[in-house]
Image (cartoon, rainbow, N blue to C red):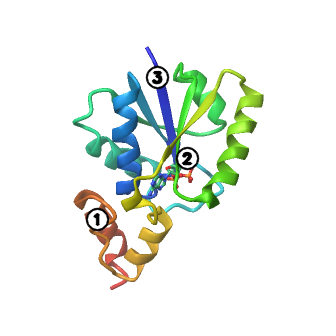
Amino acid sequence: MKTAIYPGSFDPVTYGHIDIIDRAAKIFDHVTVGVLSNQSKKPLFTVAERVDMLREIVRDLPNVDVTSFSGLLVDFARACNSQVVIRGLRAITDFEYELQMSQTNRIMNPDLDTVFFTTDLKYSYLSSSTVREVAYFHGDISAFVPPLVEQEMLKKFSDQK
Ligand code: ADP
C-alpha cells in the first residue's frame, strides 16, 4: 500500500491545500495530512483546532486521515510507514526552499522522496498568511477558505471589532 504524508502548517487550511489533498488522494492508497506543531511560530489556530478543521473537511475522503506531529519530518514519515512526502508548488519562489527541504530529507533518509503537485492556477496566489491578513482587517475570505474555516476565522478576530 502506498501511503503519502502531506505536512504543513495549515494555519488556516485553504482551498489551495484542499485541492492538493483531493488530487493526492486519487493517486495514493492513503494520505496522512500532518499538521506541524512548530514551537518557533506563533500560530493563529492551535494545532488541535487545525486538526479538527481539517478532519471535518476531509471527512468524505475515506483514504485520508489527519494528525499532528512535531520534530523532524523524516521521523514523522517513518512513524507513518511512508516513503513519500507531498508538497505543493505555487511559484518559483516556493521552489528553492522546497528543493532544499527535499534534499535535506533525502540525506537523512534516502528512501524518502518528495512529490510536488503544481498548484491549480486558480489557487496559485493563495497562501495562509494572506488569508490571515485579509481576515485580520475583516475582509471577505470566502473565496479562499471553506465556510467552516471562515466561521472560525471570524470568531478569532471578532473581539477586535
Ligand atoms: P508550510 O508552513 O509547511 O509551508 P503551509 O500550510 O503553508 O505549510 O503549506 C503546506 C504545503 O501546501 C506547502 O507545500 C505549500 O507549498 C502548499 N500550498 C500552500 N498553499 C498552496 C496553494 N494555494 N496551492 C498549492 N499548494 C499550496
In the rendered structure, which amino acid carries the disc numbered 2? Ser
Q: Image height check: is 113 above or below 55?
A: above
Q: Crowding near pointer 1: few (<14 within 10 Å), some, many (20+)?
A: many
Q: Position of residue 50 (x, y in %)?
A: 40, 50
Name the front one of labels 3 and 2. Answer: 3
For this view, does 115 lie left or right of residue 141?
right
Nearer to the camera, 48 or 114: 114
Question: Quick check: marks 3 and 2 in contact, CB under 8 Å?
Answer: no
Farthest residue in the top direction?
A: 1
In the rendered structure, which amino acid carries the disc numbered 1? Glu
Q: In this view of the protein, can residue 65 be seen by the observer? A: no
Name the front one of labels 1 and 2. Answer: 1
Residue at x 34% of width, y 45% of height: 54
Quadrant containing the N terminus in the rendered view: top left
Lower sequence index among marks 3 and 2: 3
Q: Position of residue 97 (x, y in %)?
A: 68, 52
Circle on res. 3: 3
Residue at x 46% of width, y 19% of height: 2
Q: In this view of the protein, can residue 90 be seen by the observer? A: yes
For this view, does 86 lie left or right of residue 58?
right
Nearer to the camera, 160 or 95: 95
For this view, does 96 lie left or right of residue 55?
right
Q: Secondary structure at mark 3?
A: strand
Quadrant containing the C terminus in the rendered view: bottom left
Nearer to the camera, 110 or 122: 122
Circle on res. 135: none
* Alpha carbon separation for disc pair 3 and 1: 30 Å
User: Which image quadrant is residue 110 in?
Assistant: top right
Circle on res. 150: 1
In the rendered structure, which amino acid carries the disc numbered 3? Thr
Q: Secondary structure at mark 2?
A: loop
